[in-house]
Amino acid sequence: MRAYFDRLDWERIGLAVAAPVLAILFAALVTSVVLLISGKSPTLALSDIFSYDIHPDSTVAILNRATTYFLAGLAVALGFRMNLFNIGVEGQYRIGAFFGAYVAGVVSAPGPVKIILAILVGVLAGALWAGIAAVLKVTRGVNEVIASIMLNYIAINLIAYLLQTNTLGYQPPGSNNVSTKPLPADAMFFTIGTYGGQIWGFVIIAVVLGVGFHLLLSRTRFGFDLRTAGQSDGAAQASGVNVKRMILTALLLSGGLAGLAGIPELLQDAGSYNLTFPPGIGFTGIAIALLGRNNPIGIALGALMWGAFDRASNQLGFDGFQPEITLIIEGTIVISVVVAYELVRRYGLKRQQSRVGRELAAAAAQAAGSKNKEAAA
């Protein structure tokens, strides 16, 4: 046991722990200053968040919301791993949810078949929407950030047009709300009953996808090629990797995950797609991927934290806090994490360079001493 602890790289472990600790301290400091300036008590805000979120019903709601956030975070992280900035997850999420809801609603089939159709169509629609930006990048060199941002607005307005013109929409008798055709009860995904409420069955799918994400990127040739292509096009091409094909594949997979992110909300809660479908999920996924450092475990923790802040925002409002306080806290945490990890990375790199320099100087001095002894002899 002692030999095991002696082999541990304590400096590396210390740097890994220092980054999140610094981020938490900095985020707490900035948030406290903002709250004090607004005349509110930081301790009351923290008390509200922790006391409200530990209730059984709040815990279930947080877990359900985190499922959607986690899938969106995975979609963004897959692109980030190849140095691709898929900012279009919001549009891909909406396209996937809309067409998944439409196809499942209009097809005459048993409930389980509708569930499978909604999932498959959602993934396919999200992948195809991301494929537009992918094709533009590999064929015309269009930056994926610009293309995917523009596609977000096209997706939002296209869906609104298709719904409001009743082209693909459905208007219940006596209602002004336009949506896709509502799904029957047997087409809703299963839930897990607990003391605090119904946990979405998609939590299990999210866990499986998180494990698969890790294995795909860290234990397969595809994952190695994807990371290599993201770090250096030249190195990837030299090792026989088709960079354009990897870009296309990565963005299609990212879009497919983004399209899947809207299905839990559809099959576990809403039952149809309408203009009030939860907005901002894709943009939240970007923040969560950054917060989780593109690691499935980190993304899961970030998704849970985001879900907790969303849930606690209601209680903060009851105690007189402005709703923007939650957004300030979330944004501060993301910035703090990015800055803290960058500072720690630079410090670690500087320490490594100094250590290598000392080792090279010691080796040169030893070689010079040996040469002098040989000359004297």
Image: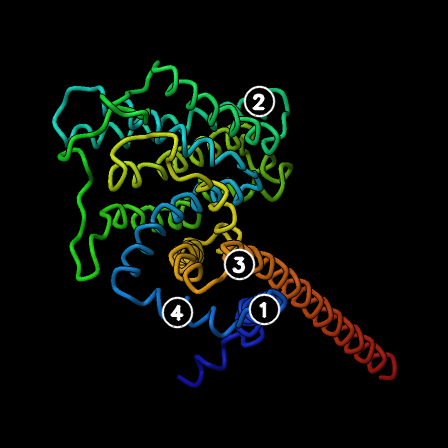
Which callout, 2 or 4, points at the residue further toward the start of the chain?
4
Which mark is in front, 1 or 4?
1
Q: In this picture, is 211 found above or below 345?
A: above
Q: Secondary structure at mark 4?
A: helix
Q: Residue at x 32, y 30 (%)?
A: 273
**Crowd band around label 1 with a 10 angstrom C-alpha radius: few (<14), some (14–19), many (20+):** few
Q: Residue at x 34, y 49 (%)?
A: 67
- Image coordinates for residue 359, horizontal then vertical, percent: 72, 73
Which mark is in front, 3 or 4?
3
- Image coordinates for residue 8, horizontal then vertical, percent: 50, 76
Q: Disc 2 marks which amino acid?
A: Leu
- Image coordinates for residue 276, horizontal then vertical, percent: 38, 35
Which callout, 1 or 3, points at the residue further toward the start of the chain?
1
Residue 311 appears left or right of 271: right
From mark 1 to mark 2, how far is it between C-alphas? 50 Å
Q: Secondary structure at mark 1?
A: loop
Which callout, 3 or 2, points at the residue further toward the start of the chain?
2
Judging depth in this view, the residue of 103 and 140 nearest the camera is 103
Residue 230 appears left or right of 105: right
Mark 1 vs 2: CB contact within 8 A: no
Q: Secondary structure at mark 3?
A: helix
Q: Which residue is label 2 attached to?
A: 136
**Crowd band around label 3 with a 10 angstrom C-alpha radius: few (<14), some (14–19), many (20+):** some
From mark 1 to mark 3, how far is it between C-alphas? 12 Å
